[in-house]
Image (cartoon, grey):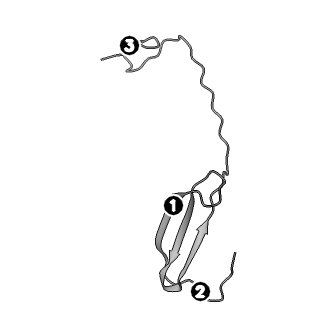
Amino acid sequence: MYPSKSTLRTFGFSLSGGVDLDGNGYNDLVVGAFDSDSVIVLRARPVINIQTKHLESDLNVDIDGDSSCTRGAQTW
């Protein structure tokens, strides 16, 4: 990090992302400040971890409120 004594003019003039610049597995965001001849790199990192679990069952499911369908069946 190199702090600047001048203010950033036209911050957000350009945006670029989709590339992992720091090698941590997450795409980072670069924000340009054209009039200041500067860019700011916003490094991405995980902030939450979500774990899901799906339990399959053979219960009947009421899809359209009119009929009961078993797993794998379709209604028309």
- State the CA–CA distance, disc 2 to disc 3: 65 Å
Q: Earlier in the sequence, mark 2 or mark 3?
A: 2
Q: Quadrant of the C terminus?
A: top left
Residue 73: quarter of image: top left
Q: Amino acid at mark 3?
A: Ser
Report the disc number at residue 17: 1
Q: Nearer the viewer, mark 1 or mark 3?
A: 1
| Spot occupied by residue 39 in the image (x, y as percentages of width and height) | 56, 75
Classify mark 2: helix, strand or loop. Answer: loop
Q: Which residue is mark 3?
A: 67
Q: Which residue is mark 2?
A: 7
- State the CA–CA distance, disc 2 to disc 1: 23 Å
Mark 1 and mark 2 in contact (Cβ < 8 Å)? no
Classify mark 1: helix, strand or loop. Answer: strand
Residue situated in front as seen by the camera: 11 or 74: 11
Q: Nearer the viewer, mark 2 or mark 3?
A: 2
Q: Earlier in the sequence, mark 2 or mark 1?
A: 2
Above or below, 25 against 4 in this view is above
At 52% from the left and 84% from the top, the residue drawn is 9
- State the CA–CA distance, disc 1 to disc 3: 48 Å
Residue 67: quarter of image: top left
Above or below, 4 against 26 in this view is below
Q: How many marks?
A: 3
| Spot occupied by residue 46 in the image (x, y as percentages of width and height) | 66, 51
Judge left or right: residue 58 versus residue 69: right
Classify mark 3: helix, strand or loop. Answer: loop
Q: Quadrant of the N terminus?
A: bottom right
Q: Residue furthest bottom?
A: 6
Q: Amino acid at mark 2?
A: Thr
At 49% from the left and 65% from the top, the residue drawn is 16
